[in-house]
Every structure is written in C-alpha cells, then in structure tokens.
Image (cartoon, rainbow, N blue to C red):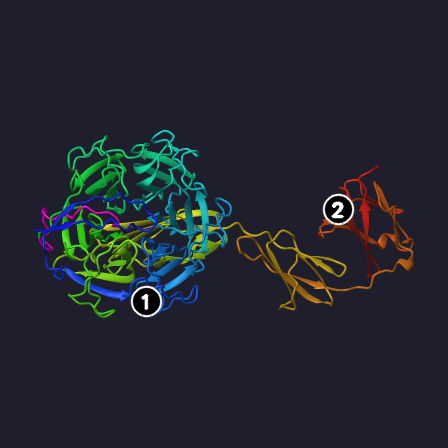
Amino acid sequence: MVVLLNSSTSQLKPMKKIFLFFFLVGFCCKDSHSQSGVWTWINGSNISSSTGVYGTQGVPSAANYPPASYEYLEWKDSQGNFWLYGGCNTSAFSDLWKYDPVTNEWTWLKGNGVAYQVPVYGIKGIGNPSNSPGIREWCAATWVDASDNLWLFGGNSGKNDLWKFEIATGEWTWMSGDSLNVQSGIYGTQGIPSAGNMPGARYETCSAWTDSLNNLWLFGGFGYDSSGNGGSLNDLWKYDQLTNEWTWMKGSPVANPTAVYGTQKVAGPTNVPSGRKSYTKWKDIQGDFWLMGGHRAIGNVYLNDLWRYSLSTNEWTWMSGSNTGNDPGIYNSYCANDSINIPASRWEQRSAATDACGRFWLFGGVHFYPNYLNDLWMYDPSQQNWNWMSGTNIPNQPGNYGIKGVPSVTNIPPSRWGAIAWWGNDNKFYMLGGSNSNTDPIFSDLWIFEPDTNCVVGCSGLPIASFITSNDLCPGACTEFVNLSTSASSYIWIFPGAIPSVSTDVSPSNICYNVPGSYDVTLIASNGTTSDTLTLLNYITVYPAPPPQGILQSGDTLFANPGASAYQWFYNSTPITGATDYFYIATQNGNYNVVATDSNGWEAVLNNVIASLTPALSKGEGVTAFPNPVTEYLEIRGLEKNITAAEISVYSLLGEKIPLAVKCCPLTVDCRPLPAGMYYIQINQNEKMIRTKFVKSAYR
C-alpha cells in the first residue's frame, strides 16, 4: 500500500477558491504500461502551455491545433466531427474550433484569437455573425441537438446565459438567461414549465444531455440557488426549444443538499444525488441519463457514486460507488470484466464519452487534490460493472508520448484534470488537453485509445443511422438523401410532408416538398437483428416562394417590385455595374431583366422587358396638368387634337400603376381616391410620351 500525504496547499486552481485539507490517500501499486488497448499521440504539442497554431480562419490544416487549455467546451456533430470552444490556461479564450478525425486536421472557425473577450449578446433569439458568448471556462454545460446545433450554458464565475451555434450559418444566438453574472435561480413549480423559470447562474457542471424530443437537460454544478446563496447544487432542469421554457424537474432549490441514496440499483421517487460539481454525462441506449462522481463543497468530499436518471419514471437510481465519498477505489486488474474493480473518487473528469455500444468511458481527473490521475475506465450498463482499461493507479504520472502518430504499448498520457473527450466513429476514444497542476503544465495534446478487441467486443456489428442532404429548399423543390449509416443492411425513411413520405431505398432521391414549413426526417437503419433510429427535428426547411417579379417601364425608368433584400439588373444578359436598386434608369434601348433576392436567399424569376426610349413631348407644345397641387380633379390641357387617342396613366413614385377614372372631354383625372403625396402622370400620344410629377394635396 502506498500512502500519499497531501502536503501542498500553496497553489490554487486559477481564479477558483478551493478549500484544501490534508488527506491520507491509498493506492495499490500497478504497472503503468500494462493495459487493454493502445494509446497514440496524434496531434497537438507535447510541450506544455503551447500557444497553438491558428492558421487561416476557416481553412483546415495539418499544422493547426488549439492552444493548450484547461476545461475546453466540447461537442460532436452528426457527421463525426469534434468541436471545442473556449477554455483557459494563464488566459481565457473565446475561439471555436473543429477537428476532423478522418483527416486529423483542425480548423479555427470563429473568434479572434485574443484572450479575455467579453460576450457580444446582440438581440435575444436573433443570430448575428458578430454575436459571441465571450470567454468560457470552468466547465460550462454543452449539448448537441437533433438539428446539429451546438448549445452551451453558463460557466465562468457564474453565468446563466444559454447560447446556440448554428453550424450552417456560423452564427451564435443568445437564447435564454441573463447577460449579468450571479443570477439566482427562479424555480417555479416542480414539473411545470414557465417562461419565468430560469436555472441559477452556475459553473463546474458538464452533466448535460439531449433527449429524444430534442429537449436539453442540465444537472447541478456550483452556483446560486433560489435565495441567491452559492453552493453545490443538485437541481435537474429541462429546456424546451420549441417554447423557450425551462422546467425544474428534480432536486432541491436550496444549495448544498445532501443525497438520498436509497438502495443500490433500486429506483425510488425520493432518491437524488447530493449537490456537487458534476463533470460526466453519459446516455444509455434506452435514453436514460447517467453521471458519476464530482466534488461536494460541504466537507470537501470527492465522490465516485454512479447514478442513473430515468426519463420515463422521473426517478434517480444509485447504481455503483460509495455513498460516503473519498473512496480510494479498487484497482484489481486490467480487463477483469468483473464486479470488483471501481474507480477512485474524483472530480474534474470531464473527459467522458459513450461508445457505439452504449458503454461509458472515463479518463483521469483529480483524486484528493493535488493527486492527478491518468486511469482509463469503461462501464458497461448492460452488465453493470466497471472495467479498468489503462493507465496507473499511482497519481501524477509524467506519461510517455512516444512518436506522434505511432501507436505503442508504452505510450501513456500524463496524468491530468480538466481534459475533454469524444468517442469517434472509428470506435476509438479521443482525449484532449487539461492540466496536471494549478498553473502549469497545460496540455494541447490530442490522444486516441484503441481498445484491444480481446478485451472489448467491437461495436462494428451495431447499426448507426446517419445521413445528410441539402435541407434548405424552395416550394416544389426535390432533394436527395445521402446515407452515411454504418453496419446496416436495410433502411426505412420517413419524410412527413414530402412526396413520397416513405422510402426503403439506401439513398432516396426525388424527395419533393411543396408546402413551406419545417419538417422532420427519420431514418431507421437495421442489420436484421437490431436497429438504430435517427430523427432530426425540423431538419428540412421549405421557405415561402418569393413573390413573382414584374417590371414596369415609366419613360426611361424601369421599376421592379420593391421590398426584396437585393437586386441586380442585367442588360442583354450582362450584369449592369452598380444597378442594385429596385429601379433602374435605362440609357439605351434593349433587353433588360432583374434578379431580386429575398431575405431567405432565394432568387425571384427573371423577367424581360424591352426598353424603348421614345421622345417626350416638350412643355412648349402646350400640354399642362391643372391644378397642381390638386385636391379632386386633374385636368389635362393642350391635347385638343386626337384627344381620344391619348393614353393617360398615373404611377406612384415606386412605379406602381394606379387605376383612376379618366373622363373626356376635356380630359380629367379623378384624383380623389389618392392619398396625399407625389405622383407621376404619363401621357402617351402619337408614339410620343410626356411624364411629369404632380402633388395630391391633403387639404380641400
């Protein structure tokens, strides 16, 4: 037995208040390189506190990688790409990055690479390219919804703002919460949604899940209760994207509540985890939520209890681990696949992921500050046991990087806390960043762990449903779905609102949408034994058809319908430089058309007009309109010859033709229906045209 005494209390985690005590910690010694799989350092630097390589924004490169950071925010999209945001080392960041596991390339997508950027909130509910959550650190919660939007909540020293990032538009939207710090929770009535409900500001909570109905769920953390008191929380919240409302589902509205464990593996309506800084999030194949361990402020307790929350019953179940905390764990042997092994108590273990078989993976954390871990664990919810997969039970290991890109049984990541993790579509565990002290080193290294198939049954036999398509359409447009599913032999597609509405093709084509609106798409991929269902809510957007464009010629001026977002005029099919307004003054005879683009980016139908510039009658010919201004009737004088051959038209300044009664003789226009304002009167006679302005007076 190795007994370690925590004798260092001089260093504090950057900008966090941690109450430290002395602990005796027991570990069983174990060979640090014996493991049930192989680690490979594949990207980033093995030198601590690296500033990263940003490259050119929006351009992927094998040379790019994010700066070393502690507690990045992480996501995985439906195409298998990894995303991260923010984090901190000696500085805090607000940059958004994407990693492609297939090419092993990072892309810097958003942010300016400058530390300590404040949020740019913009208008709540409206996306904008300049919006930004600003710096985010200290474990903000993250979600990915069914439409592949990335969400985050809280973080820093106490925020309760909710943000959405749309990958398609590249824009952040402030969705809910306050722009001020340290807001108290507004709980309302448990189980009842309300526009007035709002979780209190919080940080150190990564336990966040998305359910099958696209609701976002959030548990605990360190934050502010209904009275504004700070402490460890155990409240469970649900956010409905459709109504933009929060619901307090379980837990206490008061900080620092104790746990009700009940009987292990037996659900109960009163069971509930204690308030805690909570860092893990797993979801099993039944859709239930899981969390493990963390840190409870009262008593400075480190936890290794494993909990399951059932959506169908709204009940918690204590599944594994100690109900007293500060547990040293049991490190029996690698790949034992028994009920003996159990991880030690820990916190800052955000590096957690769920594999394709629904098994839970967990790496590192800190067990009794400052003892940092590099152990890798797997929990199988179907067998309800932990499996020690890799790493050592001895804290503060320096690790061994080996050669970048080269797997080796001697490779092992250094011990750390505050790392993040993903499970790749290649059935490998990915781990990035973190720290193994309060200040330095901070890591930027990206690792993969490939399990030994003799220890871990591969997941390649389980079907995974996935697809892409062009999902922004005009009415009447058709699209083709590209099937990206794996390990499946048959497919059922469901297209509500489309023609056809069902297909069993591998990659259906000519799926047509005629009516504007938002539509779900469901794919059920099966291998004959089991199946995987993917439903993307509101995935297809059919925008309203733009209004048809008409072109009106008034003398030498051509008018399109006003109100579009953009215009471009063409002469004989060639764009006219600078002709981008709703009207254009023609300079020569010829064929003119216009492209009008609406707010959704759709272009109206092109229309052609032959502009013929005819000579106008001069004032010297004695044609006048009287009186001007006019209140009731406008008389046209000077057209005594061929008076019945004259064509008289009235137009608004926007070029809209206004039908008015014209009497003869003399020629008189009834202007009484006109609102007060300025108008054009146009007189065509004998292939000549005169056009002049007149004013309709508001006074009689």
Residue 630, compared with residue 453, is above or below; it is: above
Res. 103 mark: 1
Image: magenta residue range: 333-349
Left or right: residue 496 compared with residue 233: right
Q: Is residue 337 magenta?
A: yes
Measure the C-alpha gap from mark 1 to mark 2.
65 Å
Asked whether the viewer can see residue 568, the reply is yes
Counting from the top left corner in percent of width and height, residue 265 is at: 16, 38
**In the rendered view, does 499 fall on the left or right side of 310?**
right
> Which residue corresponds to mark 2?
659
> What's the residue type where badge 2 is placed?
Pro
Residue, far top: 189
Judged from the image, the secondary structure of the residue bearing numbered disc 2 is loop
Q: Is residue 649 in view from this perspective?
A: no
| Percent coordinates x, y for residue 176 in the rendering | 43, 42
Relative to 504, is 648 on the left or the right? right
Image coordinates for residue 611, horizontal then vertical, percent:
72, 63
User: Relative to 22, is 437 above or below?
Assistant: below
Residue placed at 40% from the left, 34% from the top?
197
* Numbered circles on residues, count: 2
Earlier in the chain: of badge 1 and badge 2, it is: 1
Please tell me in which quadrant of the rendered image residue 183 appears: top left
